[in-house]
Image (cartoon, rainbow, N blue to C red):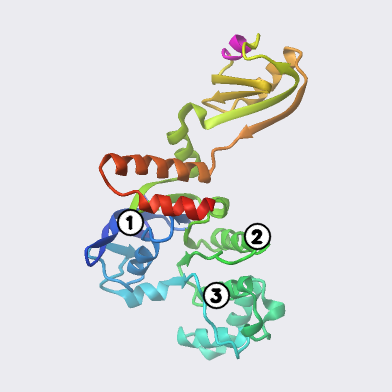
Amino acid sequence: MNTPIIELEGLTKYYGSVKAVDNLDLKIDKGEIFGLLGPNGAGKTTTILMMLGLAEPTSGNARVCGINATSDPIEVKRRVGYLPDSVGFYDGMTALENLRYIGRLNGIPDDELEERATTMLEIVGLQSEMHKKTAAYSRGMKQRLGLADVLIKNPEVIILDEPTLGIDPSGVREFLNLIHQLSRQQGLTVLVSSHHLHQVQQVCDRVGIFVEGKLLVQGDIETLSRNLFGEENYVVVVDVKESLSDAWEHQEAALKLRGVQHIQVNNNTVELSCNEDVTPDIVRFFVQKGLNITGVHKKEFGLDEIYHRYFENNQKKNVSNGKSDSVFKKYFIRRNG
């Protein structure tokens, strides 16, 4: 059995009477990309600060690379690279000069520094911009330079706090692809803290949903979807040329297909909820019945749906317990305008 490279046990943090992190248990394996998801104020950054030894837990402990972050924070910092949501550089210096400076602070010998700094800039795609002053860098370029900054000391773990904030969609795709590539090629463990669900879904092996200091659930997206939506986990939508009535003549026969649990007919569309992916069987059935198919697609229950369902479930629980649901209201107002 592999020893987790990140292990949080009963991690709790109070600021006065406010509980920012509530009895957090989490294990992340080497080489894994884990997404810590939640709205602003959920406790994500506080958790990261405790993992880095920059904040002391009220109770519980955080071990990173087998090291207790509270009792030996310097050793943790040697092994972990941290990219905060806002990266600062010396604007009057070039990217290469900034990176050389960071390398010296990290104790990299001078005879290795130039080659390593240049290599890092090549890895993050800034080789053609390395002699440009960072004052002229865009937000996306600064995030790439920040990643080079993190990587120059060859960390075992990198922690990214809202890494795509303020980057345009094209830059986000490129940045996330780079993270995924680095993790797979170098065996890096990556913790991504974010409230951008779709972006995180593209790159993470597992996710944890974090609300009001509590980790509500964790797992890969397929497992979370199956646990939440049950028989609706696989939904196949078939569009046909014909107009169908609610009392569709082939509905009873379609319900006998392997895996099909429920059918909903709406004019030219048939939606079949299944407990497994039987799309080929469904298509063959429609063809055999002489129906003219104009489109077939699978309705995916992605991270966005999973996230909102857990929000709803936790909100109902809080209301039934007489707790305020203001956090949820603020989140949905901010998200939906």
The residue that label 2 is drawn on is: 169
Q: Which residue range is magenta in the image? A: 251-256
Q: Is residue 319 rendered magenta in the image? A: no
- Confirm whether residue 239 shows in the render: yes
Q: Measured from the top left, where is residue 127 in percent x and y?
A: 69, 77
The disc label shown at residue 213, or none:
1
Closer to us: mark 2 or mark 3? 2
Q: Tell me if residue 190 comes above or below residue 119 in the rendering.
A: above
**Circle 3 crowding by C-alpha within 10 Å: few under 14, some 14–19, many from 20:** many
Q: Do the numbered discs 1 and 3 sit on residues whose CB atoms are within 8 Å?
A: no
Alpha carbon distance from label 1 to label 3 = 28 Å
Query: Is residue 210 rendered to the left or right of residue 256?
Result: left
Image coordinates for residue 64, horizontal then vertical, percent: 35, 65
Q: Amino acid at mark 3?
A: Gly
Mark closest to the chain's N terminus, 2 or 3: 3
Q: Which mark is residue 50?
A: none
Q: Quadrant of residue 46?
A: bottom left
CB of mark 2 within 8 Å of CB of mark 1? no
Residue in the picture at 30% in, 63% down: 62
- Asked if residue 65 can be seen in this view, the reply is no
The amino acid at mark 2 is Pro
| Count of picture labels | 3
Give the mark nearest the N terminus, 1 or 3. 3
The residue type indicated by label 1 comes to Gly
Q: Name the side, left or right, on which 150 lies relative to 172.
A: left
Identify the residue at horizontal 51%, vertical 84% (top origin): 102
Is 58 drawn above or below residue 298 in the view shown? below
| Label drawn at residue 146 | 3
Q: Secondary structure at mark 1?
A: loop
Residue at (64% x, 26% y) in the render? 279
Element class at badge 2: helix
Q: Is there CB contact under 8 Å for labels 2 and 3?
A: no
